[in-house]
Image: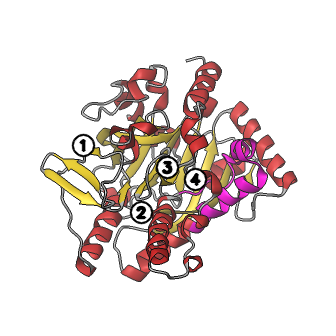
Amino acid sequence: MKPDTYYNMPKYTELFGAEVAASIASYEVSQVYAVKELVEQEGIHCDFHLTRATDVFLDAEAARDAERAFRQLQKDGAVNLRDVQYINNPASAVRVSGVKGALSAFTFTAGQLYPYKLVTSLLELAMSRGNINLQTNTPVTSISPTPDLKGYYTVTTPRGTLRAGKVIVCTNAYTSSILPQLRSRIIPVRGIACSITTTPDPATAPLLPTTYALRFNAGLMDYLIQRPSDNSIIVGGARETFVRDLSSWYDNVSDDKLISSAAERYFDGYMQRHFAGWEDSGARVDRIWTGIMGYSADAVPFVGDVPGTDKGLYVIGGFTGHGMPAILGCAKGVVEEIQMESKMLEGVEGSLWKGLRTLPAPFRITEERMQSKANVVLDEWGRTWEKAKL
């Protein structure tokens, strides 16, 4: 659960301006503490830990680019960098991070957790407190484009239909399968992750005190945490093994096989190769899988009521593999918006509710965003391809 406090701020500044970029950074930081408070207040056991993130740069050009961008952020002064520590001495970067060959590093406050445990706990809490009906293994295949005369949308599933005055589509990568107007705006993107265990005794594995991103050349990055329950490592990335084949990962929802068989070899000896003290750990890949993320064509999530439809149809999606420091507030914003509309219909002052106003402005769906032809995903892929000469 890693807020973007510096890395993408130059991109956001170019897209939206310095003040808006700063608002995105501060929002993501706030979400780390929002999840912390939620977990503590509700007594949710999801392996949540408040920690630091360590971004390690292993390529000289990438390290220089990061320093140049960071110094510019410092000079501009819009983004709050108080929590960001920059370590530009290679020896210090290696010592602080424990990563072999580190040239520089950034650290900042972050969280880590087990998302599935968080989601299932929230579902259980909701069902215990209200009139909630959870239907599993029941995919929605379509939603009527407009409500009927009574204001109800028809939601179709293989097990029958239902009618609802308010519908929230929060299927992320699969959004366009039921909202085709978002076909080019939220794109399914395949990624690879694996679990690395240690043998024969996991308790003897070195401890990683922070979460990590290992940044290689041309935007290629791996990311990992150590699970405190069993000292296993969850690591994702390996893009260099498949990024050259666009159709294998872009606009592709296949999760029944790995994107690239080379990924298995990529993660072999991963901890021994990159982390000091892991040479004799016996660390090995235990499981490896491909998952589907929902990437936003313009770099930020799509949140709010869908333009071109009657009120009542909402979407939350397009988190670009970076949803944990954003989703909770987005969900709250949409629900408050719905509550606000309901209260206003009943004559209650709507200004009591903040709704979508709590979110950074670029997150909100607009007609302009819907009609835009911009595609940051493909632009960045092109730059990665060119710089890495893959």
The dot on residue 363 is 4
Q: Which amino acid does label 4 sit on?
A: Phe
Please tell me whether mark 1 or mark 2 is closer to you in this view.
Answer: 1
Residue 27 left/right relative to 70? left
Q: Is residue 229 visible?
A: no
- Secondary structure of the residue carrying tag 2 is loop
Between disc 1 and disc 3, whose residue precedes? 1
Please tell me whether mark 3 or mark 4 is closer to you in this view.
Answer: 4
CA separation in Å, label 1 and label 2: 31 Å
Q: What residue type is labelled 1?
A: Thr
Please tell me whether mark 4 or mark 2 is closer to you in this view.
Answer: 4
Residue 238 % position (x, y): 45, 33
The C terminus sits in image quarter: top right
CA separation in Å, label 2 and label 3: 25 Å
Q: Which colour scheme is used?
A: secondary structure
Q: Do the residues labelled 4 and 1 touch (CB within 8 Å)?
A: no
